[in-house]
Image: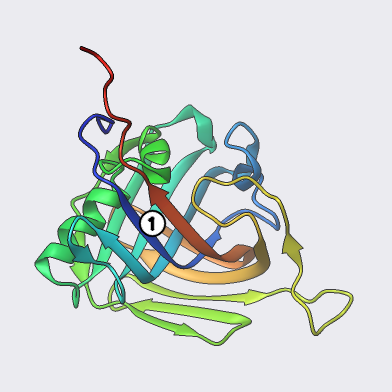
């Protein structure tokens, strides 16, 4: 767990999309105390940082994928997790993203880190994202191939939304989608078809801790 007395302010915003093995919608997405569809919930979060700053390191243009394998009731902990950061990131950006995504920088990922039981060593591989509006795609050679597509609503010109939805890492407004994924890193492995998907424009901000008033 990060020590709040040593955390420096940082911020990031961009695109976050996901797919897991649950049927639409993943109960664990609504709250970790809810039972997911299957005995294990397996999936990923894909992150494209459009702008951000960590210490003096700009985060714009960086990408990452976090694959997970959790118990049916996610709040029980013991998650398996693998972080993959795009290898085009500079050494400073790699360190910054790894610090954020492992929860050591505070903020939303600190909350999620409390549930991780086994974290594989961070990998650095080329990550390709394609954003076609209603459809998001990601590819990591030898690891991941996925597509997540917005579901149709009554008005087919508009997305189906969760609004005012609390989630640690997503924005309050999220577009509901279906996904198809193949992923295998030797520890976390899954295949999905027509299962839970989401995307949103996230914004994470960690402010400096208050100054001590002790004399």
Indicate the quadrant where residue 150 lies: bottom right
Q: Nearer the viewer, residue 59 or 194?
A: 59
Q: In which quarter of the image is the N terminus?
A: top left
Q: Give the residue displayed 12% in from the left and 63% down from the top.
A: 92
Q: Which of 113 and 185 is in front in this view?
A: 113
Q: Position of residue 149 (x, y in %)?
A: 63, 77
Name above or below for residue 100 compared with residue 198. Answer: above
Name above or below for residue 118 compared with residue 18. Answer: above
Residue at the extreme front: 215
Query: Dot 1 surroundings within 10 Å: few (below 14), some, or many (20 or more)?
Result: many
Q: Say whether residue 186 is left or right of residue 111.
A: left
Q: Where is residue 19 in the image (x, y as percent from the top left)?
A: 54, 63
What scheme was used to colour the molecule? rainbow
Residue at the extreme top: 215
The secondary element bearing badge 1 is classed as strand
Q: Position of residue 125 (x, y in %)?
A: 21, 72
Q: Give the residue displayed 26% in from the left and 33% down from the top.
A: 2
Name above or below for residue 15 compared with residue 8. Answer: below
Q: Say whether residue 211 is left or right of residue 153.
A: left
Indicate the quadrant where residue 154 lies: bottom right
Q: Give the residue displayed 43% in from the left and 54% down from the top.
A: 204
Name above or below for residue 160 compared with residue 107. Answer: below
Q: Where is residue 82 in the image (x, y as percent from the top left)?
A: 30, 53
Q: Which of 124 and 184 is in front in this view?
A: 124
Residue at the extreme right: 154
Q: Say whether residue 76 is left or right of residue 212.
A: right
Count of numbered tags: 1
Q: Give the residue displayed 52% in from the left and 31% down from the top.
A: 75
Q: Name the residue under label 1.
A: 67
């Amino acid at each position: 767990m990060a020590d709040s007395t040593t955390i420096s302010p940082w911020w990031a915003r961009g695109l976050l999309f996901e797919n897991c093995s649950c049927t639409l919608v993943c109960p664990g997405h609504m709250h970790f105390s809810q039972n997911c569809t299957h005995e294990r919930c397996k999936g990923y979060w894909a992150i494209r940082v459009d702008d951000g700053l960590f210490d003096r390191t700009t985060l714009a243009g960086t990408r990452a994928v976090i694959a997970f394998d959790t118990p049916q009731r996610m709040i029980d902990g013991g998650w398996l997790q693998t972080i993959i950061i795009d290898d085009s990131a500079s050494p400073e950006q790699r360190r910054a993203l790894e610090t954020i995504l492992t929860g050591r920088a505070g903020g939303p990922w600190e909350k999620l880190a409390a549930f991780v039981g086994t974290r594989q060593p961070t990998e650095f591989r080329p990550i390709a994202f394609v954003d076609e509006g209603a459809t998001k795609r990601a590819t990591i050679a030898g690891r991941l191939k996925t597509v997540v597509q917005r579901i149709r609503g009554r008005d087919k010109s508009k997305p189906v939304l969760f609004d005012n939805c609390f989630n640690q890492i997503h924005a309050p407004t999220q577009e509901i989608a279906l996904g198809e994924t193949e992923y295998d890193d030797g520890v976390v492995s899954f295949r999905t078809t027509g299962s839970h998907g989401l995307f949103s424009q996230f914004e994470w901000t960690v402010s400096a801790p208050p100054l001590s008033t002790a004399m």
